[in-house]
Image (cartoon, rainbow, N blue to C red):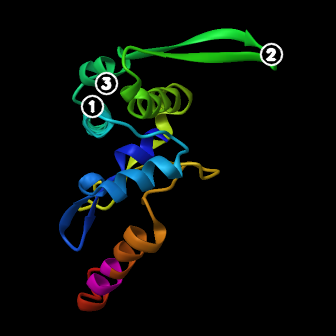
Amino acid sequence: MGLDLVDTVWMDHGTLVDQFDTPEGVRAWLDDHGLPGGDGMIGHLVEARAAMRAMLEGRGPGALNAVLAHGSRRPLIGEAGPDELLVLDDPSWEAAWLAAADLVRVLAERPDRVRHCGNPRCVLWFLDVSKNGSRRWCSMEVCGNRAKVNRFNRKSAHPSTG
């Protein structure tokens, strides 16, 4: 879920697109992740996304830690056994906090597998779940295919340098 929030901004034919520019885009993202909406929530999602990108791009954890400071998880034993209670200073932080906490979990479990797409014009991030850890593209169908086509075209244009 964390990287999904980071990737709500992408390039489309050279233009940066933000899924959260429309209420329908926000609602679709929330629905895809089974999260509630609410007043003030869009601003928190955008803030969390920026903080997560800053962390991934090497600009430090300060902004992400500020987002995470809005909540915590409290372990407890419920009727069905062990559980966790989400404690937030404001309920409108729920979706943003859960996405930020998920990114921290992924970074703790597999820091070497969180990668930026190998296409220099792509802004997407992904979790490399390939067996050998060699995935380079956010999507083989899009960025990977473009790289292969570009490499083929360069070799075809200059066969002696190939």
Quarter occupied by residue 143: bottom left
**Which numbered circle lies on residue 51?**
1
Where does the magenta region start and end?
150-155
The amino acid type of the residue labelled 2 equals Glu
Q: Nearer the viewer, residue 54 or 29?
A: 29
Q: Residue at x 42, y 40 (%)?
A: 37
Quarter occupied by residue 34: top right
Magenta stretch, main secondary structure class: helix
Q: Position of residue 120 (x, y in %)?
A: 25, 59
Q: Nearer the viewer, residue 105 or 117?
A: 105
Q: Say above or below: 76 vs 94.
A: above
Q: Position of residue 24 (x, y in %)?
A: 36, 59
The amino acid type of the residue labelled 3 equals Leu
* Callout 2: SS: loop
| Circle 3 residue | 64
* Callout 3: SS: helix
Measured in 3D between alpha carbons, the distance from the residue under mark 3 to the one under mark 1, in whole angstroms, is: 5 Å
Measured in 3D between alpha carbons, the distance from the residue under mark 1 to the one under mark 2, in whole angstroms, is: 36 Å
**Of the two numbered discs 3 and 2 in the rendering, the one whose residue sits closer to the viewer:** 2
In this picture, residue 151 sits left or right of residue 50: right
